[in-house]
Amino acid sequence: MTDQASNPIRDAIAEAIADNRVILFMKGTPDQPMCGFSARTAAAVQSTGVAFAAVDILPDPRIRQELSALSDWPTIPQLFVDGQLVGGADIVAEMYASGELHETLGVEPPEDGPGAAPEGEPPARGPAPLGIDNRLS
Amino acid sequence: MPTAAEVKARIEAAIPGATAEVSSPDDVHFSARVVAGAFAGKSRLEQHRLVFDAFGEGELGGAIHALSLKTETP
Protein backbone atom coordinates (compact mmCIF):
# COMPACT_ATOMS: atom_id res chain seq x y z
CA MET A 1 0.00 0.00 0.00
CA THR A 2 1.41 3.38 -1.00
CA ASP A 3 -1.66 5.05 0.39
CA GLN A 4 -0.09 7.26 3.03
CA ALA A 5 -2.07 10.33 2.07
CA SER A 6 -4.98 11.44 4.17
CA ASN A 7 -8.04 9.33 3.66
CA PRO A 8 -11.02 11.18 5.13
CA ILE A 9 -13.53 8.46 4.36
CA ARG A 10 -11.50 5.74 6.01
CA ASP A 11 -10.83 8.06 8.96
CA ALA A 12 -14.54 8.80 9.32
CA ILE A 13 -15.36 5.08 9.24
CA ALA A 14 -12.71 4.29 11.84
CA GLU A 15 -13.99 7.13 13.99
CA ALA A 16 -17.58 5.91 13.70
CA ILE A 17 -16.49 2.41 14.74
CA ALA A 18 -14.56 3.82 17.69
CA ASP A 19 -17.38 6.15 18.75
CA ASN A 20 -20.21 3.62 18.66
CA ARG A 21 -20.08 0.49 20.79
CA VAL A 22 -22.44 -1.30 18.41
CA ILE A 23 -22.43 -0.23 14.80
CA LEU A 24 -23.87 -1.87 11.73
CA PHE A 25 -22.79 -1.02 8.20
CA MET A 26 -25.59 -2.00 5.87
CA LYS A 27 -27.31 -1.35 2.58
CA GLY A 28 -30.15 1.02 3.37
CA THR A 29 -31.33 1.75 6.88
CA PRO A 30 -32.89 -0.46 9.57
CA ASP A 31 -36.26 1.04 8.64
CA GLN A 32 -35.63 0.77 4.92
CA PRO A 33 -33.11 -1.97 4.25
CA MET A 34 -32.15 -2.32 0.60
CA CYS A 35 -30.90 -5.90 0.73
CA GLY A 36 -32.14 -9.10 2.36
CA PHE A 37 -28.85 -9.79 4.13
CA SER A 38 -28.84 -6.30 5.61
CA ALA A 39 -32.53 -6.54 6.55
CA ARG A 40 -32.05 -9.79 8.48
CA THR A 41 -28.94 -8.57 10.25
CA ALA A 42 -30.50 -5.27 11.29
CA ALA A 43 -33.60 -7.09 12.52
CA ALA A 44 -31.50 -9.52 14.58
CA VAL A 45 -29.60 -6.70 16.28
CA GLN A 46 -32.78 -4.67 16.78
CA SER A 47 -34.52 -7.59 18.41
CA THR A 48 -31.92 -7.66 21.19
CA GLY A 49 -33.09 -4.20 22.24
CA VAL A 50 -29.53 -2.88 22.27
CA ALA A 51 -29.11 0.58 20.80
CA PHE A 52 -26.89 0.63 17.76
CA ALA A 53 -25.66 3.00 15.11
CA ALA A 54 -26.42 2.14 11.51
CA VAL A 55 -24.52 3.41 8.51
CA ASP A 56 -25.96 3.18 5.03
CA ILE A 57 -23.07 2.39 2.71
CA LEU A 58 -25.03 3.00 -0.47
CA PRO A 59 -24.80 6.80 -0.83
CA ASP A 60 -21.12 6.65 -1.78
CA PRO A 61 -19.35 3.55 -3.18
CA ARG A 62 -16.16 4.68 -1.48
CA ILE A 63 -17.67 3.96 1.95
CA ARG A 64 -17.96 0.29 1.12
CA GLN A 65 -14.54 0.20 -0.50
CA GLU A 66 -12.82 1.78 2.48
CA LEU A 67 -14.82 -0.23 5.00
CA SER A 68 -13.82 -3.53 3.37
CA ALA A 69 -10.19 -2.40 3.20
CA LEU A 70 -10.30 -1.54 6.89
CA SER A 71 -12.09 -4.66 8.06
CA ASP A 72 -10.68 -7.22 5.59
CA TRP A 73 -14.25 -8.35 5.00
CA PRO A 74 -15.63 -8.24 1.48
CA THR A 75 -19.37 -8.18 1.97
CA ILE A 76 -22.09 -6.05 3.52
CA PRO A 77 -23.54 -6.01 6.19
CA GLN A 78 -20.79 -5.80 8.79
CA LEU A 79 -21.48 -5.63 12.50
CA PHE A 80 -18.90 -4.17 14.88
CA VAL A 81 -19.05 -4.38 18.66
CA ASP A 82 -16.47 -2.63 20.84
CA GLY A 83 -14.44 -1.75 17.79
CA GLN A 84 -14.19 -5.36 16.60
CA LEU A 85 -15.77 -6.90 13.54
CA VAL A 86 -18.26 -9.51 14.74
CA GLY A 87 -19.24 -10.74 11.30
CA GLY A 88 -21.57 -10.52 8.37
CA ALA A 89 -25.13 -11.72 7.89
CA ASP A 90 -24.46 -15.45 8.29
CA ILE A 91 -22.34 -15.14 11.42
CA VAL A 92 -24.79 -12.73 13.05
CA ALA A 93 -27.69 -15.08 12.24
CA GLU A 94 -25.82 -18.05 13.73
CA MET A 95 -24.94 -16.04 16.82
CA TYR A 96 -28.50 -14.83 17.15
CA ALA A 97 -29.86 -18.36 17.04
CA SER A 98 -27.36 -19.64 19.61
CA GLY A 99 -27.75 -16.72 22.00
CA GLU A 100 -24.14 -15.63 21.41
CA LEU A 101 -25.27 -12.36 19.91
CA HIS A 102 -27.07 -11.38 23.09
CA GLU A 103 -23.99 -12.39 25.08
CA THR A 104 -21.70 -10.33 22.84
CA LEU A 105 -23.99 -7.34 23.22
CA GLY A 106 -24.18 -7.83 26.97
CA VAL A 107 -27.90 -8.59 27.30
CA GLU A 108 -29.86 -11.64 28.39
CA PRO A 109 -31.34 -13.78 25.63
CA PRO A 110 -35.13 -14.19 25.79
CA GLU A 111 -36.22 -16.93 28.19
CA ASP A 112 -37.68 -19.11 25.46
CA GLY A 113 -34.45 -18.78 23.52
CA PRO A 114 -33.86 -16.46 20.60
CA GLY A 115 -34.87 -19.12 18.09
CA ALA A 116 -34.52 -18.55 14.39
CA ALA A 117 -33.38 -15.18 13.18
CA PRO A 118 -36.21 -12.74 12.60
CA GLU A 119 -37.30 -12.23 9.04
CA GLY A 120 -36.39 -8.61 8.72
CA GLU A 121 -39.70 -6.87 9.24
CA PRO A 122 -38.33 -3.84 11.03
CA PRO A 123 -40.16 -2.33 13.97
CA ALA A 124 -41.67 1.08 13.43
CA ARG A 125 -39.20 2.78 15.72
CA GLY A 126 -35.48 2.32 15.72
CA PRO A 127 -32.37 4.24 16.55
CA ALA A 128 -31.71 7.10 14.22
CA PRO A 129 -29.35 6.01 11.47
CA LEU A 130 -25.97 7.66 11.56
CA GLY A 131 -25.54 9.45 8.28
CA ILE A 132 -21.87 8.92 7.74
CA ASP A 133 -22.15 10.56 4.34
CA ASN A 134 -23.07 13.77 6.10
CA ARG A 135 -19.92 13.62 8.15
CA LEU A 136 -17.79 13.55 5.07
CA SER A 137 -18.85 16.73 3.35
CA MET B 1 -22.33 -16.43 -14.22
CA PRO B 2 -20.68 -19.06 -12.06
CA THR B 3 -22.48 -22.28 -11.30
CA ALA B 4 -22.78 -24.01 -7.96
CA ALA B 5 -20.34 -26.64 -9.24
CA GLU B 6 -17.77 -23.96 -10.06
CA VAL B 7 -18.15 -22.37 -6.65
CA LYS B 8 -17.73 -25.77 -5.01
CA ALA B 9 -14.63 -26.55 -7.11
CA ARG B 10 -13.11 -23.19 -6.30
CA ILE B 11 -13.57 -23.57 -2.56
CA GLU B 12 -12.28 -27.15 -2.51
CA ALA B 13 -9.26 -26.23 -4.63
CA ALA B 14 -8.35 -23.29 -2.41
CA ILE B 15 -8.73 -24.98 0.96
CA PRO B 16 -6.87 -28.32 1.12
CA GLY B 17 -9.05 -31.10 2.47
CA ALA B 18 -12.22 -29.05 2.34
CA THR B 19 -15.56 -30.48 1.38
CA ALA B 20 -18.12 -28.01 0.12
CA GLU B 21 -21.80 -28.50 -0.50
CA VAL B 22 -22.99 -25.67 -2.67
CA SER B 23 -26.48 -25.05 -3.92
CA SER B 24 -27.96 -22.27 -5.96
CA PRO B 25 -31.49 -21.76 -7.15
CA ASP B 26 -30.47 -19.27 -9.82
CA ASP B 27 -26.65 -19.14 -10.22
CA VAL B 28 -26.82 -15.74 -8.54
CA HIS B 29 -27.47 -16.65 -4.93
CA PHE B 30 -25.38 -19.41 -3.42
CA SER B 31 -25.60 -21.35 -0.24
CA ALA B 32 -22.49 -23.19 0.88
CA ARG B 33 -21.64 -25.49 3.74
CA VAL B 34 -17.91 -25.99 3.99
CA VAL B 35 -16.26 -28.59 6.20
CA ALA B 36 -12.49 -28.36 6.52
CA GLY B 37 -9.80 -29.44 8.92
CA ALA B 38 -8.08 -26.14 8.14
CA PHE B 39 -10.81 -24.39 10.14
CA ALA B 40 -9.69 -26.01 13.39
CA GLY B 41 -8.65 -23.48 15.99
CA LYS B 42 -9.88 -20.57 13.90
CA SER B 43 -12.68 -18.20 14.78
CA ARG B 44 -15.78 -18.20 12.62
CA LEU B 45 -14.63 -14.88 11.22
CA GLU B 46 -11.30 -16.38 10.14
CA GLN B 47 -13.05 -19.45 8.74
CA HIS B 48 -15.27 -17.29 6.56
CA ARG B 49 -12.27 -15.24 5.45
CA LEU B 50 -10.53 -18.44 4.29
CA VAL B 51 -13.52 -19.19 2.08
CA PHE B 52 -13.74 -15.61 0.80
CA ASP B 53 -10.05 -15.78 -0.09
CA ALA B 54 -10.83 -18.67 -2.42
CA PHE B 55 -12.80 -16.39 -4.66
CA GLY B 56 -10.43 -13.51 -5.24
CA GLU B 57 -11.17 -10.96 -7.89
CA GLY B 58 -12.92 -11.52 -11.18
CA GLU B 59 -16.18 -13.14 -12.07
CA LEU B 60 -16.29 -15.55 -9.15
CA GLY B 61 -15.37 -12.73 -6.81
CA GLY B 62 -18.83 -11.31 -7.29
CA ALA B 63 -20.39 -14.58 -6.16
CA ILE B 64 -19.43 -14.08 -2.52
CA HIS B 65 -21.72 -11.08 -2.31
CA ALA B 66 -24.68 -13.42 -2.59
CA LEU B 67 -23.16 -16.34 -0.71
CA SER B 68 -24.73 -17.67 2.41
CA LEU B 69 -21.96 -19.47 4.23
CA LYS B 70 -21.72 -22.00 6.99
CA THR B 71 -18.33 -23.33 8.05
CA GLU B 72 -17.60 -26.39 10.18
CA THR B 73 -14.71 -28.54 11.26
CA PRO B 74 -14.89 -32.27 10.48
Image (cartoon, grey):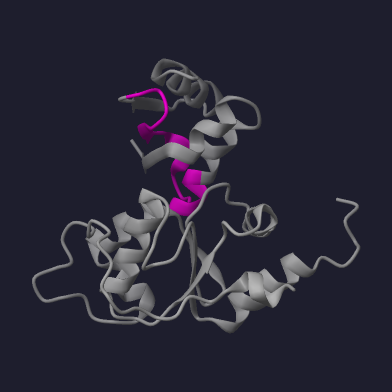
Q: Is residue B39 magenta?
A: yes
Rendering quarter of residue B34: top left
Residue A105 drawn above or below residue B1: below
Q: Residue B42 vs residue A104: left or right? A: right
* Tally of marks: 0
Q: What residue is rendered at 42% in x and 34% in y?
A: B36
Residue A92 drawn above or below residue A35: below
Residue A92 can be seen, yes or no: no
Instruction: Residue A119 in the image: state x and y as whole percent.
Output: 23, 56
The segment highlighted magenta reads B26-48
Instruction: Residue B15 in the image: state x and y as whole percent.
Output: 52, 29
Rendering quarter of residue B72: top left
Instruction: Residue B70 in the image: state x and y as whole percent.
Output: 35, 42
Q: Is residue A56 magenta?
A: no
Q: What residue is rendered at 28% in x and 63% in y?
A: A96
Residue situated in front as seen by the camera: A121 or A77: A121
Q: What residue is rendered at 63% in x and 52% in y?
A: A72
Q: Residue A123 vs residue A4: left or right? A: left
Residue A64 drawn above or below residue A19: above
Instruction: Residue A43 in the image: state x and y as whole percent.
Output: 30, 65
Residue A40 can be seen, yes or no: yes
Q: What residue is rendered at 46% in x and 50% in y?
A: B41
Q: Residue B70 vs residue A110: left or right? A: right
